[in-house]
Amino acid sequence: MNTIVTLGEIMLRLKSPSYERLFQSPLLEATFGGGEANVAVSLACLGLRSSYVTALPEGPIGDAALQQLSRYGVDTSRVIRASGRMGVYFLEAGSCQRPSSVIYDREGSAISLISSQAFDWTRVFSDARWFHCTGITPAISAEAALLSHTAIVAAKKAGCTVSLDLNYRKKLWGYGKTAPSVMGPLVSLCDVLIANEEDIQKSLGIKEPVAASMDDLDGYRALMETVQNRYPNLSYIAITLRQSVSADVNGWMALLRSPQGVYQSRRYDITDIVDRVGAGDAFSAGLIASLAEKPADAPYALEFATAASCLKHTISGDFNLSTRKEIEALLAGDSSGRVQR
Amino acid sequence: MNTIVTLGEIMLRLKSPSYERLFQSPLLEATFGGGEANVAVSLACLGLRSSYVTALPEGPIGDAALQQLSRYGVDTSRVIRASGRMGVYFLEAGSCQRPSSVIYDREGSAISLISSQAFDWTRVFSDARWFHCTGITPAISAEAALLSHTAIVAAKKAGCTVSLDLNYRKKLWGYGKTAPSVMGPLVSLCDVLIANEEDIQKSLGIKEPVAASMDDLDGYRALMETVQNRYPNLSYIAITLRQSVSADVNGWMALLRSPQGVYQSRRYDITDIVDRVGAGDAFSAGLIASLAEKPADAPYALEFATAASCLKHTISGDFNLSTRKEIEALLAGDSSGRVQR
Amino acid sequence: MNTIVTLGEIMLRLKSPSYERLFQSPLLEATFGGGEANVAVSLACLGLRSSYVTALPEGPIGDAALQQLSRYGVDTSRVIRASGRMGVYFLEAGSCQRPSSVIYDREGSAISLISSQAFDWTRVFSDARWFHCTGITPAISAEAALLSHTAIVAAKKAGCTVSLDLNYRKKLWGYGKTAPSVMGPLVSLCDVLIANEEDIQKSLGIKEPVAASMDDLDGYRALMETVQNRYPNLSYIAITLRQSVSADVNGWMALLRSPQGVYQSRRYDITDIVDRVGAGDAFSAGLIASLAEKPADAPYALEFATAASCLKHTISGDFNLSTRKEIEALLAGDSSGRVQR
Amino acid sequence: MNTIVTLGEIMLRLKSPSYERLFQSPLLEATFGGGEANVAVSLACLGLRSSYVTALPEGPIGDAALQQLSRYGVDTSRVIRASGRMGVYFLEAGSCQRPSSVIYDREGSAISLISSQAFDWTRVFSDARWFHCTGITPAISAEAALLSHTAIVAAKKAGCTVSLDLNYRKKLWGYGKTAPSVMGPLVSLCDVLIANEEDIQKSLGIKEPVAASMDDLDGYRALMETVQNRYPNLSYIAITLRQSVSADVNGWMALLRSPQGVYQSRRYDITDIVDRVGAGDAFSAGLIASLAEKPADAPYALEFATAASCLKHTISGDFNLSTRKEIEALLAGDSSGRVQR
Amino acid sequence: MNTIVTLGEIMLRLKSPSYERLFQSPLLEATFGGGEANVAVSLACLGLRSSYVTALPEGPIGDAALQQLSRYGVDTSRVIRASGRMGVYFLEAGSCQRPSSVIYDREGSAISLISSQAFDWTRVFSDARWFHCTGITPAISAEAALLSHTAIVAAKKAGCTVSLDLNYRKKLWGYGKTAPSVMGPLVSLCDVLIANEEDIQKSLGIKEPVAASMDDLDGYRALMETVQNRYPNLSYIAITLRQSVSADVNGWMALLRSPQGVYQSRRYDITDIVDRVGAGDAFSAGLIASLAEKPADAPYALEFATAASCLKHTISGDFNLSTRKEIEALLAGDSSGRVQR
Amino acid sequence: MNTIVTLGEIMLRLKSPSYERLFQSPLLEATFGGGEANVAVSLACLGLRSSYVTALPEGPIGDAALQQLSRYGVDTSRVIRASGRMGVYFLEAGSCQRPSSVIYDREGSAISLISSQAFDWTRVFSDARWFHCTGITPAISAEAALLSHTAIVAAKKAGCTVSLDLNYRKKLWGYGKTAPSVMGPLVSLCDVLIANEEDIQKSLGIKEPVAASMDDLDGYRALMETVQNRYPNLSYIAITLRQSVSADVNGWMALLRSPQGVYQSRRYDITDIVDRVGAGDAFSAGLIASLAEKPADAPYALEFATAASCLKHTISGDFNLSTRKEIEALLAGDSSGRVQR
């Protein structure tokens, strides 16, 4: 009963090399990723039992996605092969004042089409203690929104802790429903909520103004109170704070509201970002891994999650391939980047 | 009045490097191609005025496709930007006994969704003397089949010669109609038909058995008679013959039935194929270029088209980047591959 | 009458990969570029009608240069194929305290040899409203200096606005004339002058000391006055200011003297430069595009040009592949580099 | 009770790109492989439960080796992390008259140092039905020879069928024992023997001359008889026949002596080899997979193994990434390499 | 009598591309390096006669190492080919808070096994004026420690100046002796000592606390006094100071204690490190080159060495490929990174 | 007195990757080569003392050329740095019926401009026993033709054996003299002549028809007689025979007329050519190495040269990096390409 289950859409990620514009030269880096899959891989890399649930088309592209999950130790035995495409996303890495850019090509993906009844939920959660999902899946189609709801209900029934990363994506949400109308009911079923300030505003319809500046942590704390008041079911609310100075330079920290109190992590100045996609997912995985093991130590969970996420910025691809040992070394204070030899 | 117009779907072509399996290493070669676009590029490389018509989505992927067409001199001013995706095809190059493999990911592409009324056909054919299309477009959707029909009718009305490459693709034709029911009426409107023996059988429903061997040219000739009898409107019928010894070694030749008689090209033994995708399109372009310039010289047109196509096998990517001078050198008999210096 | 014509030398650009020394590993990135060609491509990317004039040798290298111009929408129908070589330049990207280094191999290039009478100037400027050239071409040979002069005279006669980027290159100017003796007469024919402080000193022989520091903008303003007084024909004088902290970190801003007054752009701190070659050309193109469309709005033209140039620093290769939309987003204040998704 | 266990040494494989000499350019392709690991991966790709046993050092290099096994579905839960290095082998691909070349750097590897008592053999074979090993492991050290012997004895005790691929490697066998003195006793414990004619001569000390030509199949049959007579314990003896015309062109077939009779496979002419390393292992895996499922159908097992091995020649890297479907298509007679689309 | 001899271990350096984790993608950059070899190459690039002494195995890997030394002008005629492996080291480049990581795989290397008697020391030093070695070689094996001692004694006997870079490596020193017990006696034979504060503490067992901060230069000066007092034989003691802000951002300066006094170099802020491996060796080479030519000008030697080392941070690979001219330009004050053209 | 001196032009060789057309993708492989330099490298790789003489421009490009020569053991101490460019040649590799193509960009190269008096011929040949040159250098300029003549005269005076490879290049010879008028006098000074049938016809103006087929060896023998009669000074005449079936498939053999008689080598069928540029130079080097060591054994020299040249076809780049051991293995009859392990 100690598996952590995640559900979502894993996509083929096609990135132009280095800082090139898309198709500037005729080469694309082809890896796989997606919010929930990134969490699943991180959890496995941290040594936890991690199982990823999705629907993928038959054929070599779906096979390759599963191989990459298996490579990093994620169980894929609960994945369904179904009709529909494999979602694709194109990524161009920004630099300085030019932002990174994501182009989604995920219409008609298998996970967006599948019925929530296609899964045997009893089997999916048979050995699970935690279920994690995000606001991305409910944004892609009405079917996927229903699927998310069904999964959360089944997870709760199976006794799982449920975490949800709001992950608002403005380029999705095209099937006719507003984010708050879908996400609100989901949040009211969860135990752990992860978000940034924009997610909360856009996904939950909370209008409360936030300075969105690291200099106004009180504003973030007030926002957490608002969310907690609206969703008293939540045990933990985590907010990540990103200060985007440029595409290469970001400040990064987080807050965690727990039954024991509200904590604030140390702040990391990340000055030469290698790849920031998936940094939020690395935070979620760090938080889940820590809370699942030591639920009472919220401050440690917060620092561990923030350090894990900090390291993700230095790793190319969606997945956080940092080891527990590396995260602990950063937690222990060594951020000097001295050569290890 | 001397533009050659082609209409079809240009796709993003994603190929694994060298002879690697798809996703064996995390890199894909990203170029663009598609039957009709390949013909359009070949024609421009041969020095003809070539204009390509299609529908593409807005954004950098569609832009990149157009840039590649412009790069080689194809006019893209008649292309429409529309809703829908960019079609994608994945390619793995075979070797020896392992065949090359194509995986289509073109559901929901802009061209498959567009209404035939979205184009201003008078403008499309305003300066055209020839229109070329293939059996691929009618295979992708009912809308695209209607689009093909509308375009052919408009082209005829504008006084164009119309050529059609049957190009049967068994992985398409999924929208509920059989190939013969769609292709037959189109062929009955055309002037020039290009095909191989399988195309004729599958696309036109002609059951007549053919040995499909270069040793049975009489069989091919008989097949041409059958087609000619069924479609008396056709002025030229070209059949390409590929003898697949292995993924690397092919024999290649062609037959042309013209008002002047039936001709047989020389045979090329291509023993170290670099990329055979698009070889048929290179043939079509060579034939069109020759017939458009010298309609009376069918034997030359046949030899030119076959030589152009032979050279395509040595060039990576969908496009035949051979020059007229190179094709003429091969026609003149130099197939020794001696270094030019 | 709305084409913008540029004239100059497009070269094969051979760059060692990443930050490697030249030939450290046996690979070179092979693209094309050159001051005026970079402007022509930028103008086309911004949606203007752009035509590039030069002389190139016959053969695949010259063909490839033209293909890259066509790819980005530049008209090349006025290019002449002539005897002589294709110019080449080798580039090694610097980092930190090691500067980038350019090695020219452009002796005997077609454009350096061609007679100014080889061009049909009436045709070149038949639909032109603007002509742009730089101080690079007059530096390569006496013939090229005469060519520049002839072109400017013809452009003026055809009613064009003429802009000139001084672009002083100390590794050129080897044919026996001093820069001021050649450039002065050209400037006295132009309407728009673009330069930095070193260009003005070296190309125009103006000795007036400038602090060459962003802290001394008054010095730059005085320098502009001096230039304006000497060349009262100039309607606009633009000066770009680069503060080179290291090969990776630069400050960047510009001043513009217009009939309406002197303006100063916002300052950009560019901390992780991808490729600064061509940044000045991106500025010229931004300025020309804006002034050609809205000559009365000098402040906007200045800000647009500076923002365009800022973004160029993030793009590899000589060409500024930024879109108008991206430049406008930066102008609108978003320089945070947040992922667009 | 249906796992197939293999034991051996997985190495880091460092290959120069394409046909380059080692270190000609400063790049190496870094994958993993080794006789028994190749078999384990093939078995997993064919859908069987496959578990690989070895000793690997701690750290990222050993981790990466395990990740590649997991990626293709091989169970690695029985692998021990131990002291010693990771073995390395360097590979240069030959062409025409220049042979491929392997340089071993495997001295002091973990598997060569480990005690046979370090493994819990009961657990290793707890759910196993088949055990496969090769003559490579016994060749690397006295400890590894003892390990091989211990494993075979334990496997037999656990009720496994035991297969052994002789795989003679002249660059190994440096620890003071002759191959026959070590391999003979091992073979006398096995059920299935796989070898080529040189393996039999060098590993078993059988001097009987063989023409080593596909034209003298009787000689091979006689050799099989000799082996069978000496080792009556063997149920199956497979001999692979490679006719090396050049580094690119090989003939390939095999013979199988079974209780039902002696069979001879079809012959494959492989004219453009992509990578022949691991072809023998692909044969072993195909044979084991077939015999494990349908022990009574020796002819099918032989053809399946030979076809699997034929396809391996077209795939880069040590692993045979052919699918069962592709092998069956080749078995069904399609060796034409026609594009699948 | 003007050759500078260095002795040590040159290794195959295998680095993952860009900032990737080891084996994240299946490619490694394969170059060669090692502390003393790096010094030898730098000296040759600076125009001095440089000869490198080591033992290497026969075969293409050892050959390739020698070729790279020859390429940059290092004499390799005194290298011995011997039994044992080629040492290997794996390198992963860090970024931001993630440190670079070195994994040694050098057990059993030829140089670690060779007897000090295998070299003809008279010949080795026949035309030498300087001998340089480091604390790395004595750390790898008892034999190599003896070899180092023997070489130093022979060099002194031949009249050479002897320099030693302490270069403490915690991942080595595994053969049973402590660093101070081995290094102390070596230092007492030398003329020039190069180190950082950690080297001094760990290699010489000096416990004296140092703030290890550039703000406490007095602490470093005191440390130099302690060393000088303990080893009065030393003519020069150089200490390099690295302030590791992150893996990309370092401060860098050095101190030199000479007979004329103690000097302090200018400080370099290196904000976008390309490759810091070998930076210390670049310092050593710069110091040796200067002292060998102008022993009386200690301040210049210090500044030259520090500038050379600063530039090394911008060059990929172990070797400092900066030219004397580039170092002098930096010394002359140009650290702006302006493009040279 | 045992150095072999070669003189010629080493160029930067820029090749498109794999079989791509030039500039199809934006990457070029950048190595160095040229007829005589290739011979010099081969000789050094075979263990002979080899010194290469040329004129190169100052700067990193010339430096890189010298570094590549030094890397393979060629002495470059007699090279002069002079004004002029570095010659460049572009190479596109052909396949099947598409020939490889060479584009020269060597106008104004240092060697084409240099005076023959710039070299100190006494020093150049001070320790030489053999001098080798080709018909390429005399083809590039009148100065270079004079240089070749001067060098040969000086070499003879210094007691050297002189060999000359005619190497006719139709794309050169543009300075106003015919090949026969220049080459004839040079041949009349030499001892060893190397050529193919076209070289003899074009360079020496011998009209005698040759079938140019391996089936007409008598024709070749007659041609050798004609040459011998015209140039009785020649001790050895070698003719190489290439049968170009396609760009990938060639037959290769050679004839040698020596004082002892006329010999004919074995014939090699090279079916998967990796790079045939430099194959003739590999032949020359093999012949020179053998004749220099064992002048009396003409048959061995012929076979050695032919085998060396055969192996060159399998190696990318201009240089034959085959080892003596590999050539001897092929001579000994092993052309099977079996993996060496």
Image (cartoon, coloured by chain):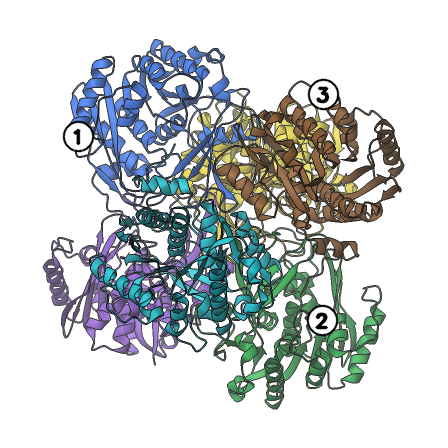
Chain colours: A brown, B blue, C yellow, D cyan, E green, F purple
The residue labelled by disc 3 is: A178
Q: Position of residue D146 (x, y in %)?
A: 49, 71
Disc 3 marks a residue whose amino acid type is Thr
Q: Which mark is residue B217?
A: 1
D71 or F188, nearer to the observer = D71
For the C terminus of chain A, the quadrant is bottom right
Output the chain of dot 1. Answer: B
The answer to which quarter of the image holds residue E207 is: bottom right
The residue labelled by disc 2 is: E302
Rounded to the nearest angstrom, the CA distance separating label 3 from label 1 is: 65 Å
User: Mark 2 or mark 3: which is in front?
Assistant: 3
Would you say A47 lies left or right of C104 here?
A: right
Q: Are marks 3 and 1 on the same chain?
A: no
Output the chain of dot 3. Answer: A
Residue F45, above or below B38: below
- Regarding mark 1 in the picture, which secondary structure is present there? helix
Residue C125, above or below A165: above
